[in-house]
Amino acid sequence: MKNEINLRVFESFEPEPSDAWQKKLLEDYQKEHPITHLKAISITENYWGTTNEGEIRDLIAVHAPIEVKFKPYKTAFIKEALPDWSWLESWLR
């Protein structure tokens, strides 16, 4: 199944209470930026499966008056972004 939307952005960033990582991220952000809503987010240096900026914009669903900065973006797949599964090979033996 193809993922047609890679990112959804809503006006407020409110993590689920059970998600400790997102809750800490929000707390740290609010300490540095004492506002209740995000004004801009940066998702630069990612590979979107295309270099066509119109197609990249179509992969981002924005449901708020938030600026989404995605440039510069990678023009090829980022091999280093994949997890290292080498441990699994030895475990399966």
Image (cartoon, rainbow, N blue to C red):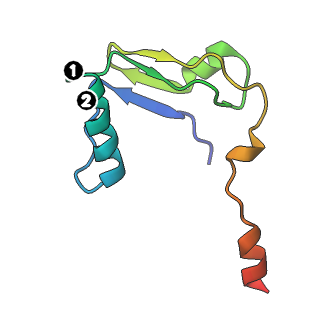
Identity of the residue drawn at 64% across and 30% down: 46
The answer to whether mark 1 and mark 2 are in CB contact below 8 A is: yes
Residue where numbered disc 1 is placed: 35
Give residue 53's quadrant in the image. top right
Indicate left or right for 77 with 69 as reference: right
Q: CA distance from mark 1 to mark 2?
A: 7 Å
Sequence-wise, which precedes: disc 1 or disc 2? Answer: 2
**x and y percent of residue 35 in the render?**
21, 20
Residue 19 at x, y percent in the picture:
31, 53
Q: Taking 66 as reference, is 10 above or below it?
A: below
Image position, residue 86 (x, y; %): 76, 68
Q: Quick one: 76 or 35, which is closer to the camera?
A: 35
Could you say which disc has been placed on residue 30 in the image? Answer: 2
Tell me: residue 49, above or below residue 58.
below
Helix, strand or loop at label 1? It is: loop
Name which residue lies at 33% across and 13% down: 65
Q: Is residue 7 above or below residue 91?
A: above
| Amino acid, disc 1 | Ile
Depicted 1 relative to depicted 9: above or below: below
- Across and down, in percent, residue 12 comes to 26, 28
Q: Quarter of the image holding residue 27?
A: top left
Residue found at x 62% / y 48%: 1
- Label 1: how many Cα within 10 Å (few below 14, some 14–19, many 20+): few
Helix, strand, or loop for circle 2? helix
Q: For this rendering, which residue is in front, 88 or 27?
A: 27
- Residue in front for this viewpoint, 5 or 84: 84
Q: Nearer the viewer, residue 31 or 91?
A: 31
State which quarter of the image contains the C terminus: bottom right
Within-10-Å neighbours for mark 2: few <14, some 14–19, many 20+: some
Q: Is residue 23 left or right of residue 71?
A: left
